[in-house]
Amino acid sequence: MANKAAGTKGKGGAKLAKSSDRGSTRAAAKAGDTAKKIESLALFVASSARKQQSPRMEIPTRSLSNVRFDPKKAIIEMGSNKQAREFFDLGMAKKFMQTLLIASACKQLISAGKTASIRQLYYMSKHDVAGTREKTFNDQAESDPIIEDLEVSIDALREELHVFASNRGALVGPVTLVDDGNTLDCMRMGSAGYAVPGIVEPDVIQFKKCTAKYILHVEKDTIWRRFYEDRFHEKHQCIVTHGGGQPARGMRRLLRRMHQELKLPIYCLLDNDPWGYYIYSVIKQGSINLAYESRRMAVPAARFLGVSSFDYDRCGLSDDVKIGLEDGDIRLAKQILAYPWFKGKKPWEKEIRKMIQNGFKMEVEAMINKRLTYLTEEYVPMKIRDKKQWLD
C-alpha cells in the first residue's frame, strides 16, 4: 500500500513524485531543448538559402510500409524511410512553407510558456499569402498532419511542442494525483470522474498515492458509467478508465505511465468486433500512424479480457445481442489477422476466425441483456479470475 506522504512508494515499490517542483524544472529543460531543435531547423533552412541551395528538410514517412514490429520490445516502431521536402519543388513548396509556419507557431508557444490546441494552432498559422488569394491553410485537415511531420522530423513530441489534443476519457478509482499543482482524490471526483487532459506528462501530473490492484480500461463512456454506478472500483479496489472509443494520446500516455510507475496491470474490456480488436492493438503495440510515439504510449503487457467471440455460447447469450457482420468488418478482421503483431498468435487467430464463422459481432452491452448488473457483478470478475480466457 502506498504511503500518504509524497515521495513514498506505491504498489510494487514504484516511487511516486515528491512534488511538482521537480517536474517544473524538467519541463523547463525540455522546453529549452525543443526550442533549440526548432531553431536548428530554421538555421539550416536559412543557411541553405544563403548558399543559394534549395532549402529542404527530411520527413520520416508515416505509413504502414515504414513501420516494423519489434518482437523483443513488443511495440510498433517507425522505420528509416524519409521523404525530402524542398522549397524549390513546386509540388512540395506549400507543405514546406506550412511546416515552417507550424514550427514558428510552436516556438512562439514555447517562448511564451503557453499551450494551444491543434485547432488553435491552425488559426495561429492561417493567413493570406502576401500578393495572392491563397491561404496558408485551407482547413485543419491540412495543418494536423504537418504537426505530426514536425514531431518526427525534429524528434520532439506534440506535448513538447506545447500542443495538446482535446480532453477525452475519464477515470475513477483509488489513486490520488497532483494535476497542475492541485491534489485530486480520484475516488471523490463525482459521477463524471477525473477527466483525463491532453497533456499528462510528469510536469503536469504526478502520482501521490495509489492503492489500486489493477486498471480496467473500457471502450465507451456509457460502459464506464455502468461500472461507476455499480461501484466496481470500490468493490474490487481498481481504477476504471475509458477512452471514448479509440483512446486519445493523453489517455494512452496516462495508461502507460500508471502501468510503469505504479506497477498496475491493465485489462481491456472492448467490443467483440474488428474495431475493438484494433483499439486493443493500439493500446498494446501502438498505432501505425504514430509509431514514433509507441515507446512512451504502448503497453505491451496489456491483456484483452473480452468481449470474446466464444462468449456467446460460454455466457448463454440470446440471439438478441447479435449484430450482423458487414463486408467491411470481415475485410478489417482479415487485415488485422495479417498484422505482424497478431500473425502467428494462435489464440488471436482462433478468436478472429470464430467471429467471422459466427457471422455476427457483439458489443460489451450484450452482457447487460442477461441482467443489468451481470457485466459488473459476474462477467468481468469471472474474466479476471480465469486467466485462461485472457488474450495477449
Image (spheres, rainbow, N blue to C red):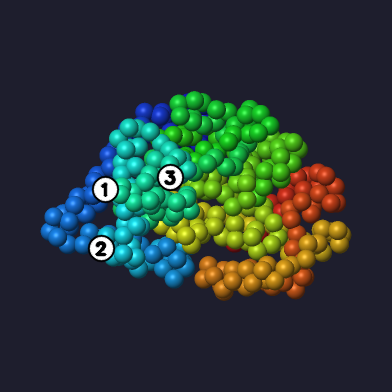
Q: Nearer the viewer, residue 277 or 41?
A: 41
Residue type marked 2? Phe
**Residue receiving disc 2:** 88
State how far apart marks 1 and 3 are (Cα): 21 Å
Kind of element beneath mark 1: helix
Of badges 1 and 2, nearer the viewer stands: 2
Count residues near mark 1 (Cα–Cα under 10 Å), then give few for <14, some for 14-19, many for 20+: some
- In the picture, measured across the screen, residue 211 lies left or right of residue 121, that is right
Q: Residues within 10 Å of mark 2 (few under 14, many from 20)?
A: some
Residue carrying label 3: 122
Residue 187 horizontal side relative to residue 231, left or right: left
- Foreground label between 2 and 3: 2
Q: Position of residue 46 (x, y in %)?
A: 19, 52
Q: Amino acid at mark 1?
A: Lys
Task: Give the alpha-carbon distance from disc 2 to disc 3, as whole Å.
Answer: 24 Å
Q: Quadrant of the N terminus?
A: top right
Give x and y (percent) for residue 206: 46, 34
Q: Which residue is mark 1?
A: 37
Q: Is 255 drawn above or below residue 357 in the view shown?
A: above
**Contact check, label 1 and label 2, Cβ < 8 Å:** no
Secondary-structure class at tag 3: helix
Q: Earlier in the sequence, mark 1 or mark 3?
A: 1
- What residue sits 25% from the left and 51% below the top? 41
Of pointers 2 and 3, the one earlier in the residue sequence: 2
Q: How far separated are the C-alphas under marks 1 and 2? A: 23 Å
Q: Amino acid at mark 3?
A: Tyr
Q: Secondary structure at mark 2?
A: loop
Dividing the picture into quarters, in which one does residue 104 lie? top left
What label sits on residue 323 in the rendered view? none
